[in-house]
């Protein structure tokens, strides 16, 4: 949702800068988009990974949806959450090509490569699971060499599908960023070192707070929906407050995000 919003806002700006032959303004607009994506993507990535099981328990663990189902679903969420920053960055990178002479071919080609990477990563991850781990080898032997049957007996194998999607997302984002740098239309603006320190420290603070709350509230199967709900809200809200507070304490100001 945030990625689409950022892409919608940045496209007319980039188009006007390119049309006005303002390469410096074009580069600054991209830089603003990248910083905003990381500002949102890093805490979202960390938060989803740490809150995956509480989130799944709060939303779905009722009646026939068991604690094991919650754990299995949370593994998929954790795997795919690792690419949240990449998914956001693509929403800024793709409009950068659309705004330059209506170049739609390059993002499509990059997406095709990402799809092929997804398939290759899926095959590679499943092969590693079956041939490079004791659990995989035992399952494959028990299934008489039938890899489909072997995978069906391994708890958590499905999460590798989500991980392959995440890896493909990073392939897509890295491709587009590299092509922009090669075309010379993006130059990194000053201040990235300070921004990365601010984001790193703030994200670390968020992680510490959420991990501490997870240790206090470890078994989410004991509560009903509203007890789970307020605890999950407290975790998300507490992490958000610490993240925002640390950014402000380290010198980041809202005016820097206006572009």
Image: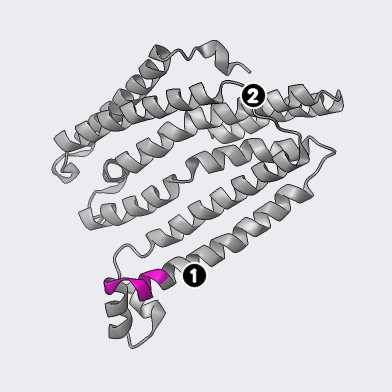
- What is the CA distance from the residue labelled 1 to the residue labelled 2? 39 Å
- Taking 205 as reference, is 75 above or below it? below
- Residue 5 shown in magenta: no
Is residue 153 rendered to the left or right of residue 119?
left
Q: Of the residues under marks 1 and 2, which one precedes in the sequence?
A: 1
Residue depicted at 44% across the width and 25% down the height:
197
**Res. 251 in view:** yes
**Residue toward you, 192 or 168:** 192
Tell me, for residue 181, which label it has, or none: none
Residue 151, percent across and down?
36, 73
Is residue 166 rendered to the left or right of residue 60?
right
Residue 123, percent across and down?
49, 70
Dot 1, how many residues are within 10 Å of its Cα: few (below 14), some (14-19), or many (20+)? some
Residue depicted at 80% across the width and 43% down the height:
103
- Taking 21 as reference, is 115 above or below it? below
Which residue position is annotated with label 1? 123
Which residue position is annotated with label 2? 189
Is residue 198 rendered to the left or right of residue 140?
right
* Secondary structure at numbered mark 2: loop
Q: Based on the displayed image, in which of its 4 quarters is residue 148 positioned?
A: bottom left
| Quadrant in which the C terminus appears | top right
The residue range painted magenta reads 128-134
**Residue toward you, 195 or 216:** 195
Residue 217, percent across and down?
16, 36
| Quadrant in which the N terminus appears | top right
- Residue 131 shown in magenta: yes
Say whether marks 1 and 2 touch (CB < 8 Å).
Answer: no
Is residue 19 rendered to the left or right of residue 254?
right
* Secondary structure at numbered mark 1: helix
Residue depicted at 33% across the width and 21% down the height:
242
């Amino acid at each position: 949702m945030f990625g689409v919003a950022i892409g919608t806002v940045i496209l007319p700006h980039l188009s006007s800068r390119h049309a006005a032959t303002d390469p410096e303004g074009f580069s600054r607009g991209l830089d603003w988009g990248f910083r905003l994506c990381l500002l949102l993507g890093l805490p979202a990535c960390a938060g989803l990974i740490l809150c995956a099981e509480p989130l799944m328990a709060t939303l779905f663990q009722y009646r026939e949806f068991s604690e094991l189902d919650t754990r299995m679903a949370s593994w998929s969420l954790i795997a795919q959450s690792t690419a949240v920053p990449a998914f956001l960055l693509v929403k800024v990178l793709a409009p950068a090509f659309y705004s330059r002479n209506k170049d739609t071919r390059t993002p499509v080609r990059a997406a095709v490569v990402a799809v092929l990477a997804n398939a290759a990563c899926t095959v590679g991850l499943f092969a590693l699971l079956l041939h490079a781990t004791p659990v995989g080898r035992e399952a494959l032997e028990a299934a008489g060499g039938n890899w489909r049957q072997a995978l069906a007996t391994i708890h958590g194998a499905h999460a590798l599908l989500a991980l392959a999607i995440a890896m493909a997302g990073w392939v897509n984002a890295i491709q587009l960023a590299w092509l922009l740098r090669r075309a010379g239309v993006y130059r990194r603006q000053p201040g990235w070192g300070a921004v990365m320190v601010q984001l790193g420290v703030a994200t670390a603070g968020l992680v510490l707070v959420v991990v501490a709350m997870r240790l206090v509230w470890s078994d989410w199967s004991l509560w009903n929906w509203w007890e789970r709900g307020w605890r999950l809200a407290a975790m998300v809200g507490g992490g958000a407050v610490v993240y925002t507070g640390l950014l402000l304490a380290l010198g980041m100001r809202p005016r820097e995000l206006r572009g």
